[in-house]
Image (spheres, coloured by chain):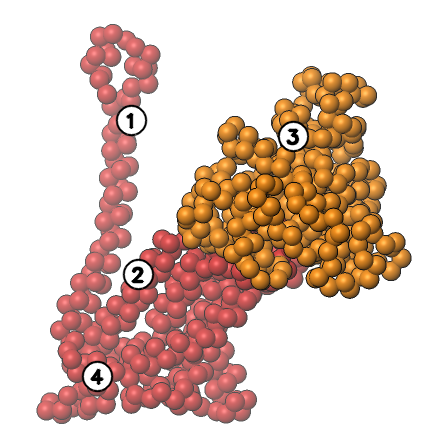
Amino acid sequence: MSTPAAAQQPSVLAAFAPSRARRRRDRRARAVIAGFTVLALVPLVLIVYYLLQKGLSSWSGSFFTSDPTGASFFKSVSIGGIKSAILGTIELVAIASAIAIPVGVGVAIWLVEYGRKSLFANVVRFFVDVLTGVPSIVFGLFIYITLVITDLVGRGLAGYKGSLALALLMLPVVIRSSEVILSLVPNSLRESALALGAPRWKVIFRIVVPTALPGMVTGILLAIARAAGETAPLLFTVGSSNQTTANPGSEMNALPLQIYNDILSPTTSVINRAWGAALTLVVMILLLNLIARLISRRSRLA
Amino acid sequence: MTSDGSIPQTADVTSDELREPPSSPVRRQTPAAPAGGAGSSRPTATPPGKQAHSVRLEKLRAFYGTAEQVKGVDLDFHANEVTAIIGPSGCGKSTMIRCINRMHEEIPGAHAEGRVLLDDTDIYDSAVDIVAVRRAIGMIFQKPNPFPTMSIFDNVAAGLRLSGVGRGDLHGKVESALRGAGIWDEVKDRLGQAGIGLSGGQQQRLCIARSLAVDPEVLLMDEPCSALDPIATLKIEELIDELKQRVTIVIVTHNMQQAARVADRTAFMLSGDLVEVGPTQQIFTNPADQRTEEYVTGKFG
């Protein structure tokens, strides 16, 4: 802005020229905001730094292909890698997804297409919101008191019980994100399909869901990513087995559990394995997020 | 469209699929047996024109919750004619035509009372299948709305696939629907491309093709040109003129010149009531009602 010129020839704009005090206030406010931004970045950068520094050093070929069964007190024997944890996480999350996605998408479709503003639909929405805010350990606790310490399905820890806890955790996220995307589908599409003489269920499955699909997949992947990183619901439902097992009826291993157990160890090499496992988990979740981003870019809505 | 004789003369969807209420008299030109099957056909179903069906509203009232938006309208739509409905915003024009194919009740809390007769069948009769009503009475909306996930071809085929009308010769039906909507030459080389890639006017004609593909008897148009430029509007209007050879058309419009250009008869509505209906010429030059005259001469609205 040309304040000197404005001083010589007072223009209408001169009346609005910011005073020196106001500029100073503006600069100060901007500095404070920038300072907070940097402050927020510090822990993020440090996390990534330590993850890469400590995690990468423990990565090796055998790290991904061997089970964490080695004894840590013999220096000559390898402590083993995290194969069972990786495969366990994949299996646990896959089972949880197989439960939570169909149910969650079904609830979302019902809410948007049939329940709409009805009392029951609003009650469902309320409980879904409440579930979203429930701490993850509560889901684990719920499965623990209903399935682990009762004779309902047989006592004891098992992989599928952990998957159920994860499914409960995913459910509200899947429902909410799918509902939002489904309600973004313009009503005109539903109307024109109905006006063609299409039955409502066909309108939903041939028009509404395909239109919303990229967005729904994004929300679902984010729910999966969240479930994959959870430790608390698994702690007293899955147990922990060091051996690789595909049987969800037995105790299993998972990356968050591996990290949790290893970090408690006094042995440096075992703690380093926790870093390697943490980096692996972060990379897996990052990949899921990346895929979610890519898919959401193809969305035809929004 | 009419010269090449490619109009799809498919099964008489209306009379076969709208089940007869027990007491209803036999309809004109249709077999007495309600379960006639897809093979029964209209005797005079030869190109270029076909006998379409008439629609009659009797004491039609439409509500949003408890608010009455259409207040007892009696109105006839003659077969193979274009009837325009004019009136100021919020007078209930759109609500009224949405009652004609029972789209009104899709809005939560909305319902309609009275009778809507397609020939002699009340489409609000409990024995009538709502899906069959909509198949027989197609609708074009204000904003062109091709299905965004589908190609041009699939958009037109969508009606056939979604409504489960006989699949046979899908390609032929799509082509004749696109020809019928006057858009075939523009899209024939890119049928696989996305429908939403077309211009607004083309999209609207694609939507008309989509409606024509299921071979409706009546076509309801809710301000079909209000989102289009004058040239696209002209094309749609020419199309309307051709389409009335095979369907009965009801068009809601804000544009009085458009009503004057395309409509055989014009109805004027005001705050939920039908004020006057008559031949378009008469409504615009010598209306019987004072309010009609004030509206068509631009004194209000």
The disc placed on residue A65 is 4
User: Label 2 belongs to which residue?
Assistant: A290
User: Label 1 belongs to which residue?
Assistant: A22
The chain under label 3 reads: B
Q: Assess disc 1: are there few (<14), some (14-19) or many (≥20) residues with their C-alpha within 10 Å of its C-alpha.
A: few
In front here: A217 or A167? A217
Residue found 14% across the figure and 68% down from its top: A53
The disc placed on residue B262 is 3
Q: Is residue B97 above or below residue A105?
A: above
- Indicate the secondary structure of the residue bearing disc 1: helix
Q: Do the residues labelled 2 and 1 touch (CB within 8 Å)?
A: no
Disc 4 and disc 3: Cα gap in Å?
76 Å
Question: Viewer-nearest of labels 2 and 1?
Answer: 2
Residue B139 at least partly seen: yes
In front here: B229 or B274? B229
Q: Which amino acid does label 1 sit on?
A: Arg
Q: Assess disc 2: are there few (<14), some (14-19) or many (≥20) residues with their C-alpha within 10 Å of its C-alpha.
A: some
Residue found 13% across the figure and 73% down from its top: A57
State whether discs 3 and 1 lie on one chain: no
Q: Do the residues labelled 3 and 1 touch (CB within 8 Å)?
A: no
Query: Which label's residue is closer to the chain start, 2 or 1?
Result: 1
Residue A98 in the figure: left or right of residue A2: right
Question: Viewer-nearest of labels 4 and 3?
Answer: 3
- Indicate the secondary structure of the residue bearing disc 3: helix
State whether discs 2 and 1 lie on one chain: yes
The disc placed on residue A239 is none
Disc 3 and disc 1: Cα gap in Å?
64 Å
